[in-house]
Amino acid sequence: MQTPWYKQFWPWFLIFLPMCAVVGSFVTLGIFTKNSVDLVSEDYYKEGKGINVDLTKIHVAKGFQLKASVISTTQGISFSFDKGKLPIYPALKATFTHRTLPDRDFERTITSDANGQYRLNLDTPLQGPWFIKLEPHNKEWLIQGKVTFPTQTATVLLD
């Protein structure tokens, strides 16, 4: 007497393989919906035109002979700023942009001490690669660069 199909090994084995693919697909879909990454800009044309404006601001910073470097501290981040031909150390708008996580981007206004040291205190230390822009309130010039945090040595922001 032959046993019924549901008591045999091979039908369950053949059903199990496609079911693994279906369950894996739903798990992958769930992971991607919870952790979406915005790599594509919605207004790429406008941002492309803005690159030329940034290049002009970078040339102005070179004309003023401005230089800046960044280092991690236990309290946050410290910037060394060489004011070059500027008469004073200006208040700076520091913009931090993460490569793939736009919800972590932030801006802070920072002021210096008499030696050109700018300090930014943070609640949680930064981790990973960040793009940093430094510019004054009148947006006349721009210094920018990529920094991977935490950093124990000073990283020069290239203008």
Image (tube, helix red, strand yellow):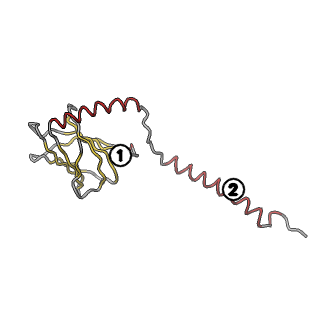
**Residue appearing at x 65%, y 58% in the figure:** 20
Relative placement, left or right, of 42 versus 85 is right
Label 2 or label 1, whichever comes before in sequence order: 2
Quarter occupied by the N terminus? bottom right
Is residue 130 placed above or below 136 in the rendered structure? below
Amino acid beneath label 2: Pro
Relative placement, left or right, of 4 versus 51 is right
Residue with the most extreme right position:
1
Relative placement, left or right, of 57 versus 25 is left
The residues bearing labels 2 and 1 have C-alpha atoms spaced at a distance of 39 Å
Camera-nearest residue between 74 and 154? 154
Is residue 122 placed above or below 16 in the rendered structure? above
**Circle 1 sits on which residue?**
98
Quarter occupied by the C terminus? top left
User: What is the x, y in percent for residue 50?
Assistant: 32, 31
Residue with the most extreme bottom position:
1
User: What is the x, y in percent for residue 82?
Assistant: 14, 44
**Circle 2 sits on which residue?**
18
